[in-house]
Image (cartoon, helix red, strand yellow):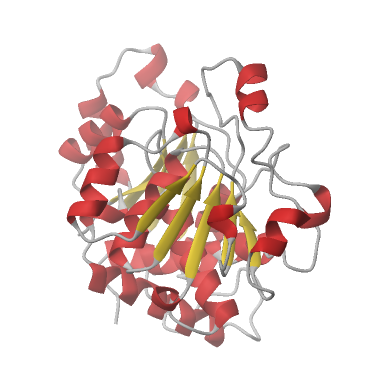
Amino acid sequence: MKHFINLRDIPKKDLKKIILNAKKRKIRRKNLNTLDADKDLPLKGKLLIQMFEKSSLRTRLSFYIAIKQLSGGALTLRPDELHLNKGGESLADTAKIISTFGNAFMLRTNSEKKLDLLKKHMTIPIINGLSPENHPTQILSDIFTIEEIKKKPISKLQICWIGDSNNVLNSLIEASVKFSFKLNIGCPKKYQPNRNLLKWAKKNKGNINIFNDSKKPAIGSDVIFTDKVVSMNDKVNKTKKIKDFKNFKVNLTIMKCAKKDAIFLHCLPRGSEVSNDVFLGKKSKVFHQALNRIYVQKSILLYCFEKLR
């Protein structure tokens, strides 16, 4: 049994093995329908329990389809339906019940502390489907997408992030260390990444460069990332924050600073941080990126069940 909570704590060889497995499984599904099971039926009879404390579209769909294709089943719980909220049941007892009925638990949460407590009391694998500080399943899937499109290891590419320092960027920073790729970050000075995370990255030989500019980090890049300026449940002055990022909108001018064959990625949903002509343009791979989450979620599940071959 293995948990999947953040990329920092997972060995590099295991992360690479997840991506390799996803590549193989995607190829094998060319002639299968969405809910047809993989021929090896690797998780037959297993139940994935999911719970979402935040809105979810791609994570919810991709994990549901992933476990189905692995020949298992999925059950989605709503926090407001549990005794955890209305009946005062402890988190520890809830964790034990979920462990008794299910075989793996995927949580999208508002609280890192809750994630840690559930991990402490659960006897089944727990997967972080998004937390305030991390979005590891998203970034691992993005690496899969980049390597699939570019047809080369991400370690040979230059990646650029333009926008807010949020949970997605945190996981991208961790990934840049694990996969040894150059990462340029463009953001306003007061929105720079977490200092402790940057110290960890530097200590582990990360190649990360921060610019308080939107064009310089894009120069020579193979991939341009961005995300919503105002994230889910972001407790800030939204009008002010959007104004602070007015010069960090990914537009055609920024894309022209990158390599000619550069691609644009966005984990969605989108906001005002990207122009329409970039988001819907030929270099945008956002819908390809979203679909690929199915294949990587499958391999993450197999990793958690220690069934990667």
In this image, 86 relative to 150: left or right? Answer: left
- Relative to 41, say whether 1 is above or below: above
* Residue under the point 43% across and 80% down: 153
In the rendering, at what x and y percent does residue 145 appear? Answer: 55, 70
| Residue 213 seen in the figure | yes
Q: Which corner quadrant of the image does residue 121 belong to?
A: top left
Image quadrant in which the C terminus is located: bottom left
- Relative to 289, say whether 187 is above or below: above
| Residue 45 seen in the figure | no
* Residue under the point 39% across and 79% down: 21
In the rendering, at what x and y percent does residue 28 appear? Answer: 53, 87
Q: Nearer the viewer, residue 193 or 281?
A: 193
In the rendering, at what x and y percent does residue 220 appear? Answer: 57, 68
Q: Which corner quadrant of the image does residue 256 belong to?
A: bottom right
In this image, 106 relative to 255: left or right? Answer: left
In this image, 9 relative to 165: left or right? Answer: left
